């Protein structure tokens, strides 16, 4: 008997490199928190502190990519249906 396949929060995109929309509620929760933190940073930092907002954005994107890497399907270049 084989163990069940892993459940990914973020499946790989069908075309190109990276991840597609979340397939699990945890992935949707991560995206909601990400966008809420981005909006909060925009409200608090823009338009007066653009460099700080840019650093905030890079920080959040790095965290999002790390979560996608850990909880998502391994990314690789894909050309469509034949890869699935």
Image: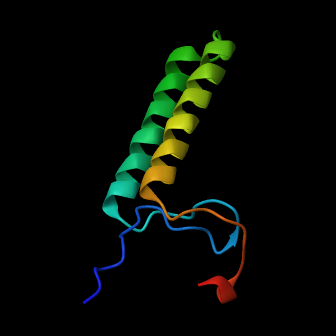
Above or below, 61 relative to 42: below
Above or below, 41 relative to 50: below
Q: Residue at x 57, y 37 (%)?
A: 61
Residue 64 image offset from top left, x and y in percent: 50, 43
Residue 42 image offset from top left, x and y in percent: 56, 25
Quadrant showing the N terminus: bottom left
Q: Residue at x 63, y 11 (%)?
A: 49
**Considering depth in this image, is 52 or 40 the residue closer to the camera?**
52
**Considering depth in this image, is 57 or 75 the residue closer to the camera?**
75
Q: Residue at x 33, y 56 (%)?
A: 26
Q: Work out which residue is located at the far front of the displayed protein and give it.
A: 1
Residue 12 image offset from top left, x and y in percent: 57, 67
Quarter-wise, where is residue 25 in the image?
A: bottom left
Residue 33 image offset from top left, x and y in percent: 39, 41
User: Is 7 left, or right, of 62 in this rendering?
Assistant: left
Above or below, 80 relative to 67: below
Above or below, 67 relative to 26: above
Color style of the picture: rainbow
Quadrant showing the C terminus: bottom right
Q: Residue at x 56, y 15 (%)?
A: 45
Q: Work out which residue is located at the far left of the displayed protein and give it.
A: 1
Quarter-wise, where is residue 13 in the image?
A: bottom right
Count of all numbered marks drawn on residues in the image: 0
């Amino acid at each position: 008997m084989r163990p069940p396949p892993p459940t990914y929060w973020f499946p790989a995109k069908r075309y190109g490199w990276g991840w597609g929309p979340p397939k699990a509620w945890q992935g949707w929760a991560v995206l909601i928190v990400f966008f809420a933190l981005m909006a909060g940073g925009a409200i608090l930092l823009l338009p007066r502190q653009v460099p700080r907002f840019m650093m905030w954005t890079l920080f959040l994107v790095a965290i999002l990519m790390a979560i996608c890497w850990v909880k998502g399907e391994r990314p690789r270049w894909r050309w469509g249906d034949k890869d699935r």
